Amino acid sequence: MPSHRTRLPQTTIIMTTTLIKHGTLITAAECIEADLLIEGEQIRLIGRQLEMAADEIVDAAGKYVLPGGIDVHTHLDMPLGNLRAADDFESGTMAAACGGTTTIIDYAAHAHGERMEQGLTNWFRKADGKAVVDYGFHLTLSEFTAHTLPDMARMVAAGVTSFKVFTAYPGRLMLDDGAILKVLRRAEELGGLVCVHAENGAAIQTLIEDALAAGQTAPRYHALTRPADLEGEAVHRVITLAKLVGAHLYLVHVSSAAAVRQIMTARQEGLPVLAETCPQYLLLSADEYDLPEFLGAKYVMSPPLRAQADQEALWRAMQGRMIQVVGTDHCPFNFNGQKTLGRDDFSKIPNGGPGIETRLSLLYTGGVCTGRLALTHFVDLIATAPAKLFGLYPQKGTLAPGSDADLVIIDPETETLISAITHHSRADYSLYEGMRVKGMPELVMLRGQIIAKNGEFCGTPGYGRFLKRVV
Ligand code: URP
Ligand code: ZN
Ligand code: ZN
């Protein structure tokens, strides 16, 4: 019988295949010698000595193959008063790609008086057509209004399942304890997660005023007016608030032994307190603030760099799984023209520094090469735990059939020199200028496409896709 149905033209979807052979595959669970087949955007197969035809064969003999890095703490195209962070979504994600990060979660924010939707729309515009790696957003609650709690539900429905609150920066971002309690309770009801920047903003403000009144204007007073005990106090306070309402809590950029002590106590009590630190707090100290010619301003960030003993406490906390994630808090301001605005007053130095490109290599060098971290633990800190905590697993954060083919190949022996001359961020300096590191990626793939090779970016602006997260 003749068919009366319209004949549709046949579409053939051609899936490119890539076979990665002879590598050592590292996940958070194990290191195995295996081959990995990519079909289209996903990992299709992992097995020993896979013998099959593929469009591309990559020889990874002697190399490590890791899941693409996930940086859950970035500030791209971020406004700060009249200033703007040096990297937008194009330059910032290019730098991320070259350093082995294939997914970021950036902090979108709404301005005072603006609804959260508007803030989110602005961030979509910033990323659209520019991002070269996949991205999600957290939403920073810049103030607490009658709209805050209902708007949080709209954000979760839009795939933005985590929120940031500040106990610091009074008058600009700081929320009071009552507001934080309400946000924690609401987030828990919605299945979301609250990320907290914990420093006692009011006490810090007094110390800043005292220092300036005494003529203490140099960058070192940034650190001296933000002592570690005021981080410990704020961490203790938000843990107490979260405990009261039975909420999960994620502490961003933990920098001090004082904060670690509070986190350990809470976790020993069984509370769902999660924590992130950043390479700068593991590897750099407050001595940087004493650099001559105002160069210490490059290191002005909040919380500030701390003492050697704090670094040791952070490494031990990671080793004991008290800290689960290493992010960057990539928030670059140029030294010339931006940091220099605070030449006569440290409190006018824009806070933040670049770091999106060096996270993997610094943690590999400082953690794996020194024997402090097993390779599997390293992968957990830079990819798997962030994916799990922020609703991206197992699409991201691991090497498994069905997961996105986001991966990084590193040659464990190759050394690279970190320099602002060669990095891809638009920041005019590096916090690690002249440092030699291992673990810079040889090859980086995002959903089956090569986006960086031997330190050169080879992706496409706009290839990065928004990740709508679900609770
Ligand atoms: O100094 C910093 N960290 N600036 C970025 C914003 C924040 O506090 O995370
Ligand atoms: Zn912060
Ligand atoms: Zn931040």
Image (tube, grey):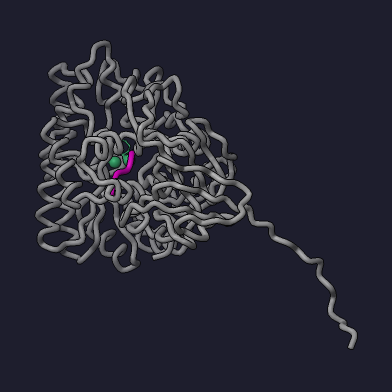
Q: Is residue 386 visible?
A: no
Q: Quadrant of residue 28?
A: bottom left
User: Residue at image x 63%, y 53%?
Assistant: 16
Query: For the view shown, which residue lies furthest in the top direction?
Result: 293
Specify whether 418 is left or right of 51. left
Query: For the view shown, which residue lies furthest in the right direction?
Result: 2
Q: Quadrant of residue 422?
A: top left
State yes or no: residue 19 in magenta. no
In front of the other: 281 or 304:
281
Q: Main secondary structure of the magenta part?
A: loop
User: Residue 214 at what x, y percent from top left?
Assistant: 12, 18
Point out the image quarter for the N terminus.
bottom right
In front of the other: 107 or 104:
104
Specify whether 259 is left or right of 161. left
User: Residue at image x 14%, y 27%?
Assistant: 224
Point out the image quarter for the C terminus.
bottom left
User: Residue at image x 48%, y 39%?
Assistant: 443
User: Residue at image x 14%, y 58%?
Assistant: 267
User: Residue 247 at what x, y percent from top left?
Assistant: 23, 63
User: Residue 308 at what x, y percent from top left?
Assistant: 13, 30
Q: Quadrant of residue 428?
A: top left
- Is 95 above or below relative to 45? above
Q: Is residue 245 visible?
A: yes
Q: Please report the bounds of the magenta region as a residue range.
A: 325-329
Quarter of the image where ligand 1 sits: top left
In front of the other: 389 or 143:
389
- Is 190 above or below relative to 197? below
Specify whether 305 is left or right of 72. left
Query: For the view shown, which residue lies furthest in the bottom direction?
Result: 1
User: Residue 147 at what x, y percent from top left?
Assistant: 38, 58
